[in-house]
Amino acid sequence: MTEQSPDPRMLASRVPSLSGVERAADKVAEILPMTPLLPLDVAGRTIWCKAECLQPVGAFKIRGAWHRLTDLTADDAAAGVVGVSSGNHAQGVAWAAKRLGIRATIVMPSNAPQMKLAATRALGAEVVLYDRVTESRDAVAAELIRERGGVLVHAYGDPWIIEGQGTAGLEARAQMRARGIDGPDRIVACCGGGGLTAGLALACPDAIVTAVEPEGWDDVARSLEAGEILSVRDMRYPTECDALQTPETWPINFAVLQARGVRGVAVTREEVRHAMRVVFERLHLVVEPGGAAALAAVLAGKVEIGDATLVTLSGGNVDPQLYAEILAG
Amino acid sequence: MTEQSPDPRMLASRVPSLSGVERAADKVAEILPMTPLLPLDVAGRTIWCKAECLQPVGAFKIRGAWHRLTDLTADDAAAGVVGVSSGNHAQGVAWAAKRLGIRATIVMPSNAPQMKLAATRALGAEVVLYDRVTESRDAVAAELIRERGGVLVHAYGDPWIIEGQGTAGLEARAQMRARGIDGPDRIVACCGGGGLTAGLALACPDAIVTAVEPEGWDDVARSLEAGEILSVRDMRYPTECDALQTPETWPINFAVLQARGVRGVAVTREEVRHAMRVVFERLHLVVEPGGAAALAAVLAGKVEIGDATLVTLSGGNVDPQLYAEILAG
């Protein structure tokens, strides 16, 4: 970023809202069937798992991307979009762009899972790689946009993205009602930059919301506790949750999380692996490490279970070799 | 079976029908949300995969069991039920019995997957083991009923079971309609004894139906070709599709399949394993070998794809070690 550029984190064009989530939900419902809400018994109680790994791109990210790209002006759509993503947002943006005939360029870490890189390219997007440790993905994206034009579609720091991800909460509420359940009263969300967590917090204003991050990447938890945005301390800290490896949340996300009293917790590698095995055996779903973090926190007793607890199984894009190793382990 | 006993295969109390499937569907809809119908691109065309591995017991068998047990007379319910199953029907019967407060005994092969045995017991059923090679499961069940009483709930040779399994076809049709598709025009079903295949053939009378069996266990295919019921030639033939290891179909199933012009095809172990890997990677679902057989036939080009092809992913109960081996392979 040059000195002349304003900080893009401060440029949010508007505040995300519940009515925005509702409008997004109408658009999403036109194109994507509801993902199942699956019951799972934990410690004698039932929790409700939202199977976002069954979305066409294998993750909830398709929701926010669809809301964002369908709201572009004709000029912006003609200029194309630039996304920044470790792999799931990449596929969401590429999927929406392909369907809408919009050119998409995605900035992805060079060490993203192979299947995420391949799937993003297969959807017709151009992938530009960066080094997760030594480069700032936001700076790479800003440079690209300055060179070629295009509209930034940030992975979490964007009101449309937040509202779009929140549509999973409205679906879950409708699905609970169809089963005669008044909820969700608690929401446990896998959290990277806080797009999904903020969206769900807006969608379900009465629910107690917990953001779950992997050990070492719990900057949102630390930020919420400190009352200010803090960054990840060690960008080399090892984690298998590639989808949740975000250096810091953005003000637009933090403002929602803070206003809603969201709390953060961190889960270990072994807790995540255990959750993946439980999902395999009892729900017959494939979840990636980052998609199992929320359930990991519940199974580890780090989050209280309510009468109608919603847990996000947020993605399923994991390389088969790693998955086999985790299952066998 | 003693000489005095009539052959139970000839004792079907009534003929299964489309109206029976419709009645079963109403009952199933009250208690089980629809399983997702997921699109999958194969050779440039879209097929529709019915994710029955997401049922509470991990397989479609819950449908027929629910239809059967909810139609028992009060006397029969009080006497309890006896099921015969390699594991998925076992769990379906146990699940329905538990919910209805009916005593369930299930005759299962001693080499059934550990997770199927454990899950059936966890649902409160009593499990009686038999040797798949040297004993007749039907004879073991008949002996049990003579000793203790109870009503036989056969895994496929029963009009309620057939109608119940067919409800998956009515759901798929409704789900296709919701997407503006007139179908299914073709149905490709995983086939053991022919309960699911017969049910789907009744549910969708205009569809071209193919029954898919594992190599060596393709007695239904051979029977349909011969015009008479033939048994599996070698009960020791190795297969990973434990859910489809049935020695022969019953007249009640054969009559439906024959009348509907159903054709059978067989798939190899490697074709099944490939299908399981495709489902992992592209749908993020866990399917067991027997649950992947239908898709295996499609991917191998052994079944023609239509404009609205329904493929059953019929179950997901597979031991993690085997699944890891197949993924890594």
Image: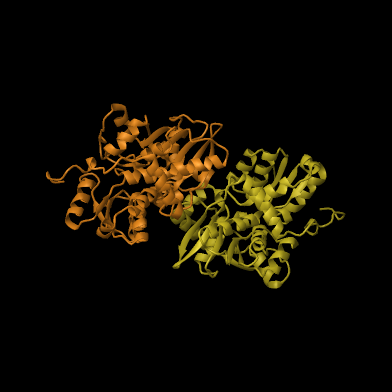
Chain colours: A yellow, B orange
Q: Is residue A72 left or right of residue B239?
A: right
In front of the other: B22 or B146 = B22
Picture quadrant where residue A121 is located: top right
Residue at figure coordinates x 23%, y 46% from the top left:
B138
Q: Is residue B181 left or right of residue B300?
A: right
Residue at figure coordinates x 46%, y 58% from the top left:
A278
Do we see residue B290 in this rendering? no
Provide residue B298's location: percent of width, then percent of height: 46, 34
Provide residue A72's location: percent of width, then percent of height: 76, 46
Provide residue B42's location: percent of width, then percent of height: 53, 34
Task: Using the image, determine if residue B110 lies above or below residue B48.
Answer: below
Q: Quadrant of the C terminus of chain A?
A: bottom left
Picture quadrant where residue B230 is located: top left
How many marks are shown on the rendered structure?
A: 0
Task: Using the image, determine if residue A78 lies above or below residue A245.
Answer: above
Do we see residue A324 in this rendering? yes
